[in-house]
Amino acid sequence: MENILIINSGSSSLKFQLIKMPDETVLASGMVERIGLDGAKLHYKSAANTVSKELEVPDHAVALKAITGLLMDAEKGVIKDASEIPAIGHRVVHGGDTFSKTIIIDEKVKAKIREYFSLAPLHNPPNLKGIEVAEQLFPQAKQVAVFDTAFHRTIPSRAAQYAIPQSFYEEHNIQVYGFHGTSHKYVTQLAIDELKKENSKIISVHLGNGCSITAVQDGKSIDHSLGFGPVNGLVMGTRSGDIDQSVIFYMIDQLGYTAQEVSDILHHKSGMMGLTGFSDLRDIEEQAEKGNRQCQLALDMNAYRIKKYIGAYAAAMNGVDAIVFTAGIGENSDVIRGLVCRDMDFFGIKLDEEKNKVRSKELRYINAADSKVKVLVIPTNEELEIAQQTLELIS
């Protein structure tokens, strides 16, 4: 048995889970939110204790020290000292074209993570900060990096490259990198195990505040909706998804916006927020139910974009065995799932409306009995996937 600490270090938050492997028992979990801001909070949960308190957290070092203190606390803790954690798995968003698999972190790996700051400016810097703090607090532990982009390194060149001068690819590595890879890998592997198909064609639909869809053939990512950055593809909470590039040039050349202002609009003021004024899908669904036509349109646009990608990926794989919905919206919104799967009988996709309405934290089928394509809802667990990959590497 090995205790694996999982750290997901964000710009103003630090999430953690301590998982006993390989039996996958979560010993403790929680997060510190609002790091560097007023009103920072620590949330901690174990089988015996729940802690939620405000404290002053100026930086990630203080956050991780507070977490470590609780993990080893005489009354509320679950371990006696740091030596009981032999490995720490870190979520790192961008591994560029360097990392195609999980790796033990050394100075060269950290230098590469730093090199990719420009590709993921909101994620890689705090990811690296979490690694550096963990190295100080757990000097005896192996530090392991699990990259969101790694799963998508199998995407072939015909799908990964853009039709721009080849020099941009060769000299600047401009290509499709893809994101949410840890989630897509986790749920598609469960789907493959469930379907018991040696050769499989699965479309994984990860719907949260950030959204992406992946074509997974025989367990490998072969195409993906997010590309060089995390803003294109599906309609998201505040991100636009696919947009005609001409709109960007028009906003700059004719409307007087700077490039930075356009970037801010597309990342933070677009998507469902831009269409409705709400970024939380629950609010949008509630307003749509009350007759808000703009919210109804936004839901239709959201689902229509997903349907288009399903059609494209079914063509790319010459068929589809299963569609998997996952992440916060994918797991909980029967409205979006229903809109996506409506009028898809040409593809052999047919929902069971009653099964679709069921709320559960378990893997479940929501397709009708006569649906040629299986439709599953599989709760994602990126922390467990990181723990599994970390254990496999250190073993």
Image: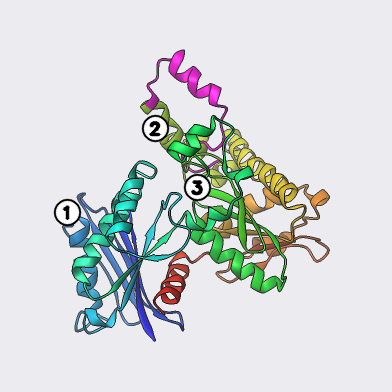
Q: Amino acid at mark 1?
A: Pro
Which SS type dominates the magenta stretch?
Answer: loop
Quick check: is 342 in the magenta stretch? no
Q: Find numbered disc 1 in the image and state the secondary structure of the residue it sits on.
A: loop
Residue denoted by label 2? 264
Question: In the displayed structure, would residue 271 be above or below residue 244?
Answer: below
Identify the element where label 3 is drawn: loop
Numbered badge on residue 228: none
The earlier-in-sequence mark between 1 and 3 is: 1
- Give the numbered dot on residue 58: 1
User: Residue 321, percent across and down?
Assistant: 74, 61
Q: Nearer the viewer, residue 103 or 70?
A: 103
Q: In the figure, is residue 249 to the left or right of 67? A: right
Find residue 194 and report its horizontal and vertical position in percent. Answer: 67, 73
* Residue range highlighted in magenta: 234-259
Label 3, residues with CA under 10 Å away: few <14, some 14-19, many ≥20: many
Q: Is residue 73 left or right of residue 19?
A: left
* Mark 2: amino acid: Asp
Quadrant in the picture for residue 71:
bottom left
Q: What residue is disc 3 on?
A: 177
Q: Is residue 13 visible?
A: no
Q: Is residue 252 magenta?
A: yes
